[in-house]
Amino acid sequence: MKDHREIIALAQQLTGAMGVAGHEDQAAQAAMELLRPLGEPRISPVGSVICTVCPGLPGKPHVMLEAHLDQVGMIVTRVEEGGFLRVAAVGGLDRRLLPSSPVTIHTESGDFGGIVASVPPHLSQGEEKPLKMEEVLVDTGFETQRARQLFAPGDYISMDGPLSVLENGRLRGRALDDRIGCAAVLMAARSLHAAEPGCRVTVVLASMEEGSGVGASTAAFDVAPDLAVAVDVSFADGFGVPAWHCGKMGGGPMIGIAPVLDRKQTDRLRQLAAREGIPFQLEAMGGRTGTDAEGIASARTGIPTVLLSIPLRNMHTPVETIHLDDVENTARLMAAFVKEAAKE
């Protein structure tokens, strides 16, 4: 079995920090600590972490490696009677899994545990449909008066889901969309920092992909790279999902093919993976990719952008699941792509 301790350690540090879209402060600080040995990280005005990890040589391309730092969650909209919180979704939460889910409420005075309220099956009226977000209530355990002292509209809520290693090289936990993409970017950055390939390389761990996408687009404008690699997750094969719409777990990174993605650089990525013996899959999309690639590609006068996606099961839940080999091969392919670009 392969040694995936580096990936697991990165995932533990990154997923252990809260970072619901628009409130990525903790996750940004965790990323800053991981990047400090490689450069001088900074935080953009909208919360993205930016760090040049290879200064590069004159005349060589400047490559940006990007993944998004934020996660899906909820925000408090009202404190109700009985210590319950009414909430709105931040990002595309899977509402089917919300009832009885443990959560953490992040307030100015600290973090508090909570539970999404549910109806016992003994008292339910037959088959229940997924709750609408306006029907979701979070039980804080406090009485009304104390709850109104502790909680307020605008407090963020994250889903609880401890990271754990499963059999056969799988990893399960919350926020792997897209902290595991961040881990792959960090692994590639470490490799390139040590190798000094000649290209200038800047890492962007972007804020707010699950909301507006402004983190990546503004960072791309700031960094102004010649090329960009966006890393995200995509749908993995599994029970009840159409195989034609998914990648295979353990089959390698999914190389995106879409109108917004640069065809020449995408072809280079495919050829390079085949030459280096790095397993890969193709993900063809006729419209938008649903990732930060759109915002990056449209920054300034346009930035040639490619997309790598890590197959993931149970998307936007506290038990997102990936294969560790796919993370390693994503990092390998990114590093090889940068080294190839340095030959220009």
Image: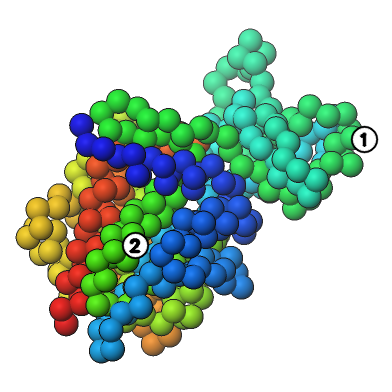
Q: Nearer the viewer, residue 179 or 35?
A: 35
Where does label 2 land, which residue? 189
Q: Is residue 149 above or below residue 212?
A: above
The quarter of the displayed image where residue 182 is located: bottom left
Do we see residue 205 in this rendering? no
Q: Which residue is mark 1?
A: 145
Residue located at (52% from left, 33% from top): 161
Residue at the image point whose x is 36% and y is 67% from the top: 65
Viewer-closest of 260 and 63: 63
| Residue 243, above or below 65 | above
Q: Residue at point 54% right, 42% down? A: 16
Res. 255 image quadrant = bottom left
Answer with the quarter of the image where residue 1 lies: top left
Return the x and y of residue 51 as percentages of the image width and height: 45, 70
* SS class, disc 2: helix
Q: CA distance from mark 1 to mark 2?
A: 50 Å
